[in-house]
Amino acid sequence: MASSLLVNGLKALFLVLWCLMVTTLIYTISIDGLPFRWEILTPWMAATLVDFYINVVPFAVWVSYKESSLIAATLWVILLVCLGSITTSGYLFIQFFNLSPQESLEDPIYHVLLNQASKDGTKPKGKHSSVAIARILFSVLGCLMLGTLIYTLLTDGSPFRKELLTPWMTATLIDFYINVVALSVWVAYKESNWTTAFFWIVLLISFGSISTCAYIVKELFKLAWQDPLYLILIRKGNRQVHKATL
């Protein structure tokens, strides 16, 4: 019963977020035109876009893993890059909507996170250097965002200035934080301790992709280098079950 309520709640959440971002996009275009103009690319807008797209990377990696078809995966990744959280919330809504009644009653987030091959234990075995590569990738991305933040603070001052809150900056921030909501759902699922989950969610809200990368790297170091990368998606107990079948 609780799992069913969770599924319905998450479907409603991501549908509402999808509608919110679509409405925001249409409204912003109607009052401020298209965003493809140099004058709106202020230093803090550029930093926000870097932050935004670093947060898109884990979604893109997950979607690439989740989709069995290379064409479908490529299409979804392109949509993530072009439409941001509209794609994120839409994709998550579809994934929760497609759960079977049994999956909805068991562990719905687990079933959404993993692709069918991983759940069936039919994922091809081989060398799994991808864990080491992912550690490096997200460490570099976290450092990139930290450097961007420091540089922008030094060259353009504090971001907490009214003149920076242009229509497209507002839309970008809404876009950004919708993705943060999706990441927060994953963190809340992963963490067995609500205090720890709350701590990381506050960090995600406060420091954006720096916290995203830090959390992912932390979780990656819980995996052995030879483990399949998808194990980062699931809880420790589920990881142990999957490792036993590998």
Image (tube, rainbow, N blue to C red):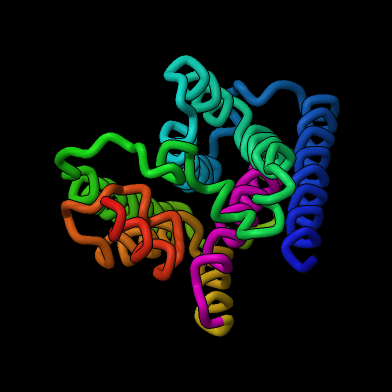
Of 222 and 152, which appears nearest the observer?
222
The relative height of residue 173 versus residue 39 in the rendered view (above or below) is below
Q: Residue at x 31, y 51 (%)?
A: 138
Q: Residue furthest top?
A: 71
Q: Position of residue 57 (x, y in %)?
A: 43, 40
Q: Position of residue 17 (x, y in %)?
A: 77, 46
The relative height of residue 162 versus residue 197 in the rendered view (above or below) is above
The residue segment tinted magenta is 170-193
Q: Residue at x 60, y 35 (%)?
A: 84
Q: Position of residue 169 (x, y in %)?
A: 66, 43
Instruction: Tell me, yes or no, if residue 125 can be seen here.
Output: yes
Instruction: Tell me, yes or no, if residue 146 can be seen here.
Output: no
Of 205 and 75, which appears nearest the observer?
75
147 sits left or right of 74 in the view = left
Q: Position of residue 164 (x, y in %)?
A: 64, 49
151 sits left or right of 2 in the view = left
Q: Quadrant of residue 243?
A: bottom left
The relative height of residue 159 versus residue 94 in the rendered view (above or below) is below
Of 162 and 203, which appears nearest the observer?
203
202 sits left or right of 226 in the view = right
In the image, residue 175 lies in the stretch drawn in magenta: yes
Q: Main secondary structure of the magenta part?
A: helix
Q: Residue at x 50, y 67 (%)?
A: 190
Count of marks overlaid on the render: 0
Q: Quadrant of residue 194?
A: bottom right
